[in-house]
Image: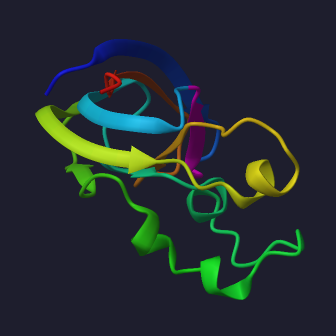
């Protein structure tokens, strides 16, 4: 895969075991090449990781009143960029290495209101109920122009 790789290092935390939604501020088009998510604090109760190309899908919002054509309001599963990753109890990290997962951000809010696309949306869902913190590294490869 030819292109320009960029790695983003991010962090997210949860005070009571609720899902963590993190915006990856990348360009609106590219390939996910690497994703590493590591729990750095809290009880290792396990967690799942999903990556979406649309903010509404990541946040579980079924419908937003932006005057959207209802055909674009598809199930969140149709906006996944990678297969769900999971860490079992006692495991601190998950890694997806060497992949080439294509994406194009399709946030309706951005396109309807003339705002720049908002990258990707990472959801970390801790399986426990206590406070947790996660470190994230994600490498995105931007395609070269032909």
Can residue 90 be seen here? The reply is no
Give left or right: position of 136 versus 13: left
> Is residue 22 a member of the stretch shown in magenta?
yes
Quarter residue 91 falls in:
top left
Rendered position, 40 above or below 81: above
Can residue 60 be seen here? The reply is yes
Residue at x-position 66% and y-position 62%? 56
Residue at x-position 31% and y-position 22%? 144
Q: How many marks?
A: 0
Give left or right: position of 144 versus 87: right
Residue in front for this viewpoint, 71 or 137: 71
Tell which residue pokes out farthest to the front in this image.
146
Image spot of residue 68 (x, y percent): 79, 75
Residue in front for this viewpoint, 144 or 34: 144
Tell which residue pokes out farthest to the bottom in this image.
70
Image spot of residue 93 (x, y percent): 23, 31
Quarter residue 54 falls in:
bottom right
Image quarter (top left, top right, bottom left or bottom right) of the N terminus: top left
Colouring of the image:
rainbow
Image spot of residue 47 (x, y percent): 34, 48
> Is residue 113 a member of the stretch shown in magenta?
no
Tell which residue pokes out farthest to the left in this image.
98
Considering the whole magenta stretch, tell me its main secondary structure: strand
Image spot of residue 46 (x, y percent): 30, 47
Rendered position, 29 above or below 49: above
Residue in front for this viewpoint, 2 or 92: 2
Residue in front for this viewpoint, 134 or 119: 119
Image quarter (top left, top right, bottom left or bottom right) of the C terminus: top left
Residue at x-position 65% and y-position 38%? 118
**What range is drawn magenta here?**
18-25
Residue at x-position 62% and y-position 45%? 16
């Amino acid at each position: 895969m030819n292109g320009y790789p960029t790695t983003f290092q991010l962090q997210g935390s949860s005070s009571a075991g609720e899902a963590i939604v993190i915006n990856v501020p990348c360009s609106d088009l590219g390939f996910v090449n690497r994703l590493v998510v590591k729990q750095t604090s809290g009880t290792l109760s396990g967690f799942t990781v999903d990556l979406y190309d649309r903010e509404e899908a990541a946040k579980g919002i079924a419908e937003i009143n932006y005057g959207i054509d209802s055909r674009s309001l598809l199930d969140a599963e149709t906006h996944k960029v990678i297969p769900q990753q999971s860490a079992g109890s006692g495991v601190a990290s998950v890694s997806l290495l060497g992949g080439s997962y294509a994406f194009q951000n399709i946030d309706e809010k951005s396109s309807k209101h003339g705002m720049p696309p908002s990258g990707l949306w990472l959801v970390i869902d801790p399986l426990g109920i206590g406070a947790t913190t996660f470190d994230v590294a994600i490498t995105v490869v931007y395609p070269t122009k032909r």
